[in-house]
Image: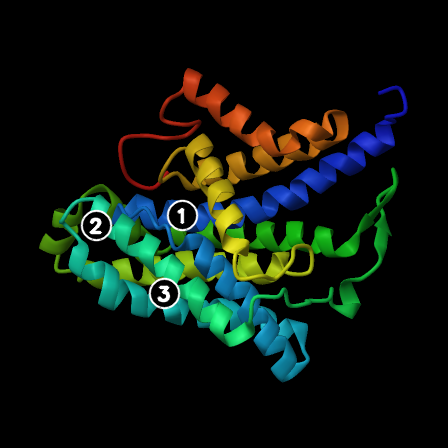
């Protein structure tokens, strides 16, 4: 304990923010879909995994990481469009259990498809050359790629907030989350809103997958662990709350990182301890409420 310096503490804090940024991206997608569609998407981890493998495919095809970074969320969004339109939509209004079971089965199916196409072994995904190395932050050197992840998450969260809060379509999304029937009475096709929101949620999950690929092994089962982490973050922040997804994602990342510094054996359990502590004080989560997007 005495060997832990202030510089090491600061570096570990940034490590937690980088990890938390991936959690934020995952939880935002879950919260978007649940907040408007009231769908607990158990295939979210599979979309994350698809994003990583799509990244491997596009990087091999183009050799360009930046093209890959744009192509992956678009590809996963198209997959999300098909899933919502042909699989999830017929189950609306039939209770929360039906889409939950459907997405659980879909996740298993997607994993098997990836195993058939790419095999059981992990696939390498190197850090792009332009983002290799470390930057001097004044208190130590920190990987440039992890700083990039923090920056991308900040830009995406800001853009999503502006879209939802400052655009007319965002107003429709917020209204649809509160009262679907009123939106229908106003002559708006709410099914198109559901389609767009589901696609955005899955696209963000795919982006999280390709961003985390250089740091984590790209394997068919990589979405399973991530799904658990994403639900922990979403529950801590409050189901359906976008603000909660951001705050909880960063908080969980920092807690896991700091626990690994002071008590490494408890690092994997720390997020669950945090979730239990939050739920004892606020059963609805930090920013949870009765309905809608927050």
Mark 3: few/some/many CA within 10 Å (<14, 14-19, 20+): many
- Distance of label 2 from label 1 (alpha carbons): 17 Å
Quarter residue 81 falls in: bottom left
Q: Pinpoint residue 19: horizontal percent, then vertical percent.
A: 64, 44
Q: In the rendered image, which residue does mark 2 sit on?
A: 98
* Quarter of image, res 284: top left
Q: CA distance from mark 3 to mark 1?
A: 13 Å
> Do labels 3 and 2 touch, CB within 8 Å?
no
Q: Is residue 258 left or right of residue 97?
A: right
Query: Mark 3 — residue?
Result: 80
Residue 208 image position (x, y, % from top left): 55, 56
Q: In the rendered view of the protein, which quadrant contains the N terminus?
A: top right
Quadrant in the picture for the C terminus: top left
Query: Which of the numbered marks, if any, corresponds to residue 133?
Result: none
How far is mark 3 from mark 2, CA to CA?
Answer: 18 Å
Q: Secondary structure at mark 1?
A: helix
Location of mark 1 (residue):
30
Residue nearest the observer in this picture, 270 or 19: 270
For image coordinates 32% across by 62% down, the residue present is 196
Residue drawn at x 54%, y 39% as measured from the top left = 249
Considering every residue shown, the one lying at the far left of the view is 185
Q: Point out residue 217 in the picture as x, y percentages from the top left corner.
A: 65, 58
Image side of residue 206 versus residue 145, left or right: left
For the point 48% across and 57% down, the residue is 205
Q: Earlier in the sequence, mark 3 or mark 1?
A: 1
The answer, for residue 132, to whether it is visible in the render is: yes
Residue 168 shows in this picture? no
């Amino acid at each position: 304990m005495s060997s832990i310096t202030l510089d090491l503490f600061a570096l570990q804090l940034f490590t937690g923010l980088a990890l938390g940024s991936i959690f934020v991206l995952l939880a935002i997608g879950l919260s978007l879909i649940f907040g408007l569609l009231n769908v607990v998407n158990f295939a979210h981890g599979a979309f994350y995994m698809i994003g990583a493998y799509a990244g491997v495919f596009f990087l091999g095809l183009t050799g360009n990481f930046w093209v890959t970074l744009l192509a992956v969320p678009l590809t996963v969004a198209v997959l999300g469009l098909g899933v919502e339109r042909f699989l999830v939509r017929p189950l609306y209004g039939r209770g929360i259990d039906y889409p939950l079971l459907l997405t659980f089965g879909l996740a298993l199916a997607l994993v098997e498809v990836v195993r058939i196409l790419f095999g059981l072994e992990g696939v390498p995904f190197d850090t792009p050359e332009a983002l290799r190395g470390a930057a001097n932050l004044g208190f130590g050197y920190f990987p440039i790629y992890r700083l990039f992840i923090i920056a991308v998450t900040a830009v995406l969260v800001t853009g999503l907030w502006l879209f939802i809060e400052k655009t007319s379509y965002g107003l429709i999304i917020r209204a649809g989350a509160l009262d679907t029937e009123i939106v229908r009475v106003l002559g708006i096709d709410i099914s198109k809103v559901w389609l767009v929101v589901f696609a955005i949620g899955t696209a963000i999950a795919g982006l999280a997958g390709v961003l985390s690929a250089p740091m984590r092994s790209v394997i068919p089962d990589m979405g399973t662990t991530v799904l658990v982490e994403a639900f922990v973050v979403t529950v801590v922040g409050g189901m359906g709350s976008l603000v909660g997804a951001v705050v909880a994602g960063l908080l969980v990342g920092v807690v896991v990182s700091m626990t690994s510094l002071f008590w490494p054996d408890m690092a994997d359990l720390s997020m669950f301890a945090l979730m239990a502590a939050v739920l004892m004080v606020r059963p609805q989560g930090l920013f949870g409420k009765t309905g809608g997007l927050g």
